[in-house]
Image (cartoon, helix red, strand yellow):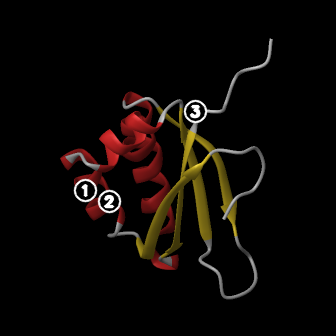
């Protein structure tokens, strides 16, 4: 049976990882960032590395089953704190929320 994704919402994050902090960045993402997102009901669906060009070198997609879950996260102190911590490892952090669809979105 296919999953009905009509109400799903996607968070698309983009940023540049500081090349001097790559190991620390990965440790933070795996030990803090992803577990907090999962605890809030938001799952990472993809991670892209841009190897060439002027775009940010990372783009990560997260999906929630509904819009309310996503916006509760974005309005939380936990979200603000987590991204302040992320900014120790990245620059040009940006994000947007869009209706979910399969495949690459930007």
Residue farthest top in this picture? 1
Where disc 2 sits, the SS reads helix
What percent of the width, then of the height, locates residue 47?
A: 65, 54
| Residue located 59% across and 77% down the image | 56
Q: Few, some or many C-alpha atoms within 10 Å of disc 1 (few <14, some 14-19, many ≥20)?
A: few
The quarter of the picture where residue 102 lies is top right
Q: Which mark is residue 53?
A: none
Distance of label 1 from label 2 (alpha carbons): 5 Å
Q: Judging from the image, what secondary structure is the residue with disc 1 in? A: helix
Name the residue located 58 percent from the left edge and 56 percent from the top edge: 60
Q: Are marks 1 and 2 in contact (CB under 8 Å)?
A: yes
Query: How far across and down, in percent of the image, does residue 94 sit?
Result: 45, 70
Q: Is residue 21 left or right of residue 9?
A: left
**Residue wearing tag 1:** 80
Relative placement, left or right, of 79 versus 12 is: left
Around disc 3, counting alpha carbons within 10 Å, would you say few (fewer than 14), some (14 to 19), or many (20 or more)? Answer: few
How many angstroms separate mark 3 from mark 1 (CA)? 25 Å
Quadrant location, the C terminus: bottom right
**Could you tell me which secondary element the residue under label 3 belongs to?**
loop
Nearer to us: label 3 or label 1: 3
Which badge, 3 or 1, comes first in the chain's sequence?
A: 3
In the picture of the structure, the residue carrying the numbered disc 3 is 7
**Residue 76 screen position, x and y as percent:** 23, 45
Asked if residue 40 lies left or right of residue 26, the reply is left
Give the labeled residue for mark 2. Answer: 83
Q: Nearer the viewer, residue 11 or 91?
A: 11
Quadrant of the rendered structure where residue 4 is? top right
Which residue shows up at 80% across the image and 11% down it?
Answer: 1
């Amino acid at each position: 049976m296919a999953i009905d994704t009509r109400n799903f919402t996607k968070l698309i994050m983009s940023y540049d990882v500081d090349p001097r902090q790559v190991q620390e960045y990965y440790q933070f993402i795996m030990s803090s960032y992803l577990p907090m997102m999962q605890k809030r009901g938001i799952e990472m669906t993809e991670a892209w590395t841009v190897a060439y060009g002027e775009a940010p070198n990372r783009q990560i997609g997260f999906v929630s089953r509904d819009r309310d879950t996503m916006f509760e996260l974005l309005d939380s102190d936990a979200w603000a704190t987590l991204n302040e911590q992320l900014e120790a490892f990245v620059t040009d952090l940006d994000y947007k929320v869009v209706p979910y669809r399969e495949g690459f979105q930007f």
